[in-house]
Image (spheres, grey):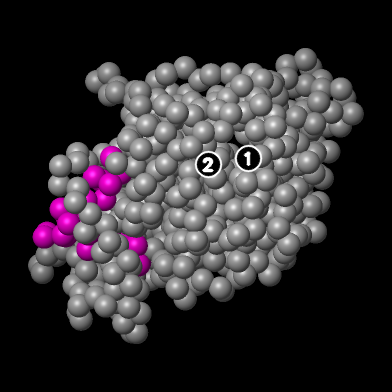
Amino acid sequence: MESLYTAADRLERGETSSEQLVREALDRVASREEELHAFLTLLPEGSLEDAKESDKRRLGGHRRGLFDGIPWAAKDNLLTEGVRTTAASKILGDYLPPYSSTAVRRLDEQGAVLVGKTNLDEFAMGSSTEYSAYGPSRNPVDPSRVPGGSSGGSAVAVAAGMCHFALGSETGGSVRQPAAFCGVVGVKPSYGRVSRYGLIAFASSLDQIGTLTRDVRDAAAVLGAIAGGDPMDQTSAASPVPDYLAAVAEGGRELSFGVPPEYMREGVAPDVRAEVERVAAALERQGMRRREVTLPHTEYALDAYYIIAPAEASSNLSRFDGMRYGPRAEGQDLVESYHRSRGQGFGPEVKRRILLGTYVLSAGYYDTYYLQAQRLRTLLRQEFLRAFEQVDVLLTPTTPTTAFRLGEHTQDPLAMYMADALTIPANLAGLPAISVPGRPIGGLPVGLQVMAPPLREDLMFAAAATVEEVAAR
Amino acid sequence: MAEHGLVQRLAALARLELAEGEADRLERDLGAILEHVERLRALPLRDVGATYWTAEAAQGMREDVSRSGLDVEDGLGSAAARSGRYLLVPGMREDA
C-alpha cells in the first residue's frame, strides 16, 4: 500500500482518481476483512459518493489540499454524525451520533474520505482488541496473533492497505502499541495538542486522539491536519501548531538523545533491547549525540496508571445506563433498570475497571490509592522534564515483546496490562511519543519509541524521521 | 485476594448487575491487581504534590454567551423510550 503522500501526488498528477483509490481500498477490505476484522462499520456507498465529489472538486480546480480524496478510517470511539458509533460495546447498540468529533470534522472539511469505523477493545480498555464486544481483530502479519489495542482495528486497516491512514485514541499506549505490533507508525500527541471533543471519554486526564500511518511524514501531515486549539475542548492547547513537515524534512541529526536504562531491563525481550541498541548506535553514526539519562520511578508508572485510569473510567462510564442511548434492560424501577442495563451492556474488562475505579475512589481508600498515584505522576513528570534538560528526545522500545497470540493473556489481566508498561509513562506525563517500525524480529514487527518534551512534537518528528531512516537499513 | 463480598458491594455502588459466577472471577482479578499496586502504596510520597492533569496551555473557559446546542430531536434520537420532548424512564418512587 502506498503512503498518503504518494497517493496525493498521483491524484495531483491525474494518474488516479479518488474513486479509484476508494475502490482499491474497498477491494482490499473485501479480500481480507473476513480474516482480520478491522472494521465495525463500513461505508462503501457513502465513501464512493464522497470520492466522486472529491474528483469533481479536483477537476474543477477546487481541490482542498493534501487530504482531498484520500481514503481513511476512524476508530469507533470517535463520534461521526449519522454514522453508527459503538465504542465496541453492546451498551451503545447502534448509536447514531448527532454530531462529529472535532478531529473527524477537520479531516472531513479537508476532503478526506471516510471508508469506515474500526474495531477496538470495548471503550478502548485493552491491549489486544480481544475485548471488543464484536469479536477480535487479527494481526495482518500473522493472523494467529493479536494486532495490539485498543486501536487494533485502525492499525490493521493501515497495515493491510485498507485505507491510507487512520485515527485512533490513546489512554495508555493504545495507538503506539498496535502500531508496533502491526509495523506501522503510531503517534500519541501531547496532552492538549488535539481536541477531544467528540471522543468517547475513558480517562479524561490521559485520553488523546492519535494517528496511524504508513510512515513518519504521513504522521506529521495527519497530526498537522487535526491539531490545534478548539473552543469545544477546554483542555486543548491554545498554542500555535508548529510545522511538523518541516521538522521531518530537517531530520534529527543535530539532536541529542538518551536511552533510559529503566526501559531496557528484565521484562523487555532481549531481541527487542538489541534492536533499540542497534538503532541507537546507528543514530550516533548519523551525528546524534547520546547522553546518559535516568527515570528512576518508571517501574511504578503501570501501578499508578491502573489506579488513575479505572478511577476516571468509573466516573466517565456512569453516563451509560440504558436511558439516553443504547438498549435498556427493564427492571422493577429506575435503579434496577440501571443495574440490568449496565450489567448486560458492559463486557468483562470494562466491569473489572469500573469496579477497580469504584474501589480506589471509595471512602477511606481515596488518599491511599488515587492521591498516591497522582503524587507518583508528579515525580514521573519531574523526572522526564529533568531528562529533557540533558537530551532533546528519548529512545526506547515501544513494547516489551512483539505481538502475542490470541488468547495468550485474556485470562490474566496483569499480563495483558504489562503490554503497555513502556507506553504508559508518556500518557501520565502528557508527553508526545511516536512508535516507528524497527527491523522485524522473527518475522514480526517491533516498534521503536521516541518521546519528546510536552508540546514539542516538532522534536519528536525530527528525531523519528532519522530513526525511520536508519531503522530501515 | 480481595476481601470476600467486596465485589458485590462495589457492584452495588457502581450500579452494575453481575451474572452468576462473575463476582468470584472479578474478586480474584481485583485481588491480584490490588496486590500488584501495593508497592506504590508503600512509597513515601506524602510531601509530593499531586498532578491531576498535565495541560500545558489550555484554552481556558469559553466566553459565557448563549448559543444553540443540540435540538431535542437529535438529543433524544437514541433514547430507549421517550414521551414527546422528554426521556421516558422507569418509575423511581413506590407510587410511580
* A429 is higher (above) or lower (below) than A405: above
Most common secondary structure along the magenta stretch? helix
Tell me which segment is drawn in magenta. A351-378
Q: Nearer the viewer, residue A12 or A469?
A: A469
Q: Circle 2: is it few (<14), some (14-19), or many (20+) Cα within 10 Å?
A: many
* Mark positioned earlier in the residue sequence (2 or 1): 2
Quadrant position of the N terminus of chain A in the picture: top right
For residue A467, say whether it is visible: yes
Give yes or no for residue A375 being in the magenta stretch: yes
Classify residue A215 as left or right of residue B38.
right
Q: Position of residue A403 (x, y in %)?
A: 62, 61
User: Do tag 2 and tag 1 residues touch (Cβ < 8 Å)?
Assistant: yes
**Residue at (30%, 37%) from the top-left corner?**
B53
**Residue at (81%, 26%) from the top-left corner?**
A9
Say what amino acid the circle numbered 1 marks.
Ala
**Residue at (49%, 56%) from the top-left corner?**
A265
Disc 1 target residue? A280
Give the label on residue A259, or none.
2
Chain letter of the residue beneath label 2 in the structure image = A
